[in-house]
Image (cartoon, grey):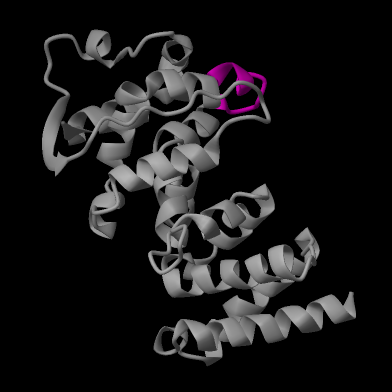
Amino acid sequence: MNLNYISDGSLDDIKSNIKHNIPNYSSNVPWLEQYFGTEPWGFPSKIRVEDIDLHMPISATVHFDFENTKKVYSALKDITLVQACDERMWVYLTHQTFWNYMRERWPVESYLNKEKPEEAIKERYFFMSNKSRALVRNGIARLWWYGYVSYDEERQDPFELTAMLLSKLDIAQSLLERVFSGNREITRAVLSVLQQKDKVEGIAVNRDIFRNLMMYINQLGGVTILDALDRSEIEELIETRLNALLYEA
């Protein structure tokens, strides 16, 4: 099938009227066709993709993000970053293609007691204004992004680092909301070092140490041209700093 996009005008409409449409986000079926009526609101792209059958969450703690990341990224592995940053595609997927999944994974009812539930809806069903966090927060785009930054074809299991990334929520959030997260050599180097510590050396890296490590990498980017280093050099820098942090702890 071809991936679909929502039109620019339709996106502007529903994004500017989230507060008015909050009741629609409680619907058990997609509502855009009824909302727009005869007005054209979606169009096909040239991106061909196999059907993606996502695992449905079964509880607040069992949501199959790892399994669904493998499905989404495997299907959309060949799209470019420019295509991945197109909000229109993800909004169509959150509001139409994967509506049932979104209703289970990010139910609007859980946001209604917040001061501004429309902001929570914007975060999960659209792109939030913070562009560096938008892909990580959108309910479907995040699954692609997890795969993008961690998939490693050189490993026997290309999704081995993805499993490490999603083993703890703090890892995913602290790593992927950094400015360097678009550099896959850096993100995969970080995950590789964590994998070594956890699976081989049996050393758990706690949240505080990991956040300090992320601060170090941010600072390192200001004095070192990380893009010019190969992954082994980046891994060496990261492991040296992580060992120091573990020793200080």
In the rendered structure, which segment of residues is drawn in magenta? 107-117
Q: Is residue 127 visible in the rendered structure shown here? A: no
Q: Is residue 221 left or right of residue 154?
A: right
Residue placed at 57% from the left, 52% from the top?
163
Residue placed at 47% from the left, 16% from the top?
22
Q: Nearer the viewer, residue 155 or 107?
A: 155
Q: Nearer the viewer, residue 162 or 154?
A: 154
Q: Quadrant of the C terminus?
A: bottom right
Most extreme residue toward the right is 249
78 to 181, vertically: above or below: above
Question: Where does the image place residue 247, in percent across and percent down from the top left?
Answer: 87, 81
Q: Is residue 86 left or right of residue 226?
A: left
Q: Is residue 139 magenta?
A: no
Q: Nearer the viewer, residue 172 or 202?
A: 202
Question: Where does the image place residue 197, in percent across and percent down from the top left?
Answer: 72, 70
Q: Is residue 176 visible in the rendered structure shown here? A: yes
Question: Where does the image place residue 24, in percent across and percent down from the top left?
Answer: 41, 12
